Image: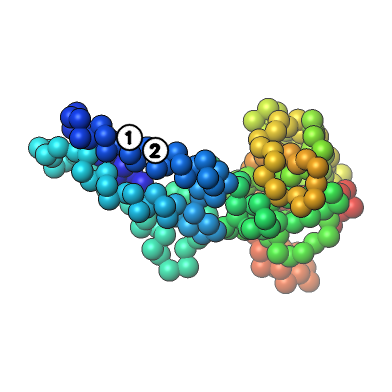
Amino acid sequence: FPFALLALGLMARDRSRWLLIAAVGAAVLIGLLLEPHRWHGGPGALGNARFAVLYPVLLFLPGRLSVRRSLVLPFAAAALWTLPALVPGATLDLPAFRTLPLELTLLGDGVQLPGHRVRVWEETVWVLPMSTSWPDEGHPNGAWFKGASTSEVLVVSPKPLDRIHFNVHSLTDDNELLVDSGTERVLVRFDTEGKRNGAPVDLKVEQSASGLGILPGAAEEHVYRFTLTVSGGIIPARRLQGSQDPRYLGVFLDVNGKGL
């Protein structure tokens, strides 16, 4: 809602405007208190419907606009999110949307994050982005991530974790992987056959969220996040004899250590 910021910035300083902004603030606060985990607006929503109803009220906050050029910045900000969303077939994985934090409360009650897939390996739940990985392949041990890409991965565990362990595979030696949890960074160079067949990653993590209702029936749950940055990859159909796989494969994230 970029025009809300414009209205606040140009708000006339008189008693009626202060009362109006106080009423809007009270309505927003009541909405947050009544439904603290549903403020996102629902799966695929670009904003909260309840706030959208209040949005036109903010038009009464500014006084007279003496400089029309002041409208350029909010229109540009609105275009970053509204214009890409109008493109046919576009998803919320567009770069403009990825600059915003993921709304983790969408994962409660079995709801999917737009543009993501939930996979369960052993007792942990992994949330993978569809734009840079292939979680729908249904591999029992993990998932492939695209070459030359950066992915944000969420891990939900029923018990607290200090570190996350997994193996990574690569089909080419001209490839590097950087794993970053915000607490620790691990760099893997696939320069030996042993590493390409499964290099172990032991990553220190810190909890990002908890108690979101992602794990039904669990006494507690803990959410962790990290990023995977892949430098390169390979298209098997072009490089490997007998392969018909047209995907640009970067690394395979082997969650349970059982391999490809």
> Is 34 displayed left or right of 251 in the figure?
left
Residue tagged 2: 26
- Kindly check if marks 1 and 2 are in contact, taking CB atoms under 8 A apart as contact: yes
The quadrant of the picture occupied by the C terminus is bottom right
At 67% across and 55% down in the image, what residue appears?
109
Q: Is residue 116 above or below residue 190?
A: below
Q: Quadrant of residue 70?
A: top left
**Tag 2: amino acid:** Ala
Q: At 60% from the left edge and 47% from the top edge, which residue is drawn?
A: 105
Instruction: Give the residue type that dot 1 points to.
Output: Ala
Marks 1/2: CA distance?
Answer: 6 Å
Q: Nearer the viewer, residue 4 or 252?
A: 4
- Residue drawn at x 14%, y 37% is 63
Residue 174 appearing in the image: no
Which residue is label 1 attached to? 22
Q: Secondary structure at mark 2?
A: helix
Query: Percent x, y for residue 255?
Result: 81, 49
- Give the residue at x 20% y 35%: 16
Q: Nearer the viewer, residue 15 or 149?
A: 15
